[in-house]
Image (cartoon, grey):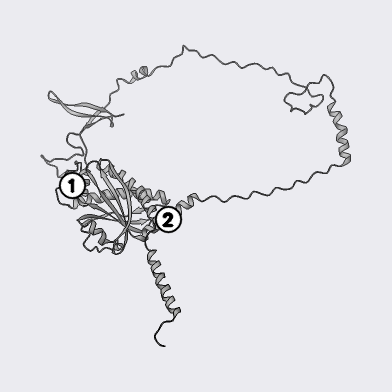
Amino acid sequence: MDGMLSQEEIEALLKDGDGQKNDTAEIGLTDVEKDAVGEISNICMGSAATTLSTLVNEKVVITTPVVSLVTLNELSSNFGRPCVFVQIAYIEGLDGSNVLILDERDVKVITDLMMGGDGSNVADELSDLHLSAISEAMNQMMGASSTSLSSMLERKVDISPPKASLLDLSDSIQDEMTSFLDGEFVMVSFKMEIGDIVDSQIMQLYSIDFAKDLYRKFVGEQAEATAPEEPVAAPEPTPVQPQQTAPQQTANVQQAQPQQQAMPQGVPMQAGMPQGQQPLYGMPVPDVNVQPVQFQQFNPSIVPLNQQENIDLIMDVPLEVTVELGRTNKSIKEILDFSPGTIIELNKLAGEPIDVLVNGKFVAKGEVVVIEENFGVKVTEIIK
């Protein structure tokens, strides 16, 4: 052996090198897979935006998904400031997890709106209250997103309770749920608008394997839904054998036809008999008397009692009218701690219209007024 490689060995090594390169290239997502993932994410975030709009009582628009493959270093260089990191795992229907990244200010605005504010209270530092509020918002948003996924994939999809934390993306993230962030992963960025208060971005991260699995399930369901039904083979027609008629039978039929055509005069054709069929001789024909039907005339002088006459019968029935300022729930321990001076917080905001109930049924809204020394209620809205 002189230590030199033969031509065959060199070609084998080059072939192996090309094969490894091709395998590495196939790790990412194709353009078709990116388009499908973006479309799925767009539909799911549309449902999530509707849910968030209900929570904050503002118009929420989450659109324009952009799918890309990035690393944590690339993400931190563009979004390195402290942000809210929300981790969500799929426990049924899909195998994997995803991460939502929101700006710290956006989380403060959403929390303030959920607490009944106008979204301007963003000066305080991010606290456990903000993290708890955004976790609840993401739980409902991703729940609506999972419902949309269930409809698309025709299988039940469920998530675990979200876990929110504040961190800097430039720091190391040690978590089993987010182990896919160690390498290249999928990032879907959305444009998020909340009324005239927020114009920002929200990002969704998950592994490439999860994205490919989501694409395969989505394409598989679409293929099954559009697959043409196999045509059912029609049964082969049974050949009809021509009937052989004996010469003697043919002669008898020809002799019988003149006898059937000959009919004595004065015998009428039987009613209801098909054309071409002759009645039996001697059969009586009934005499049917046909007359037009006559309907009874309606008497216009009979008028039913109108509604006003009926309601007069119950005009004097007494009804209980209740004015409800608000409600709250207290435990037995809290009630036993009541003492003069205890303040009970109700579920109504100051200045909010009070409820007017008739026999326990909500019928109107009003505001409290003072009439001399008594309280009163001024009805401002009737509930239909």
Q: Amino acid at mark 1?
A: Lys
For the C terminus, the image quarter is: top left
**Residue situated furthest bottom in the rendering:** 1
Q: Is residue 221 above or below residue 5?
A: above
Residue holding disc 2: 217
**What x and y, as percent, mark residue 308?**
35, 17
Circle on res. 91: none
Q: Closer to us: mark 1 or mark 2?
A: 2
Mark 2: which amino acid?
Lys
- Of residues 317 and 270, the one nearer the viewer is 270
Q: Position of residue 110 (x, y in %)?
A: 22, 46
Q: Residue at x 42, y 53 (%)?
A: 218
Q: Residue at image x 84%, y 20%? A: 265
Task: Look at mark 1 in the image and give the residue it sits on.
Answer: 333
- Foreground pick, 252 / 69: 69
Residue at image point 20% right, 51% down? 104
Q: Label 2 neighbourhood size at 10 Å, few (<14), some (14-19), many (20+)? A: some
Report whether 218 appears left or right of 275. Answer: left
Q: x, y (%) of residue 92? A: 37, 56
Determine the CA span between mark 1 and mark 2. 53 Å
Disc 1 residue crowd, few under 14, some 14–19, many 20+, Cα 10 Å: few
Figure check: 121 above or below 174: above
Residue 256 image-quadrant placement: top right
Hey, which quadrant is residue 278 in on the image? top right
Label 1 SS: helix
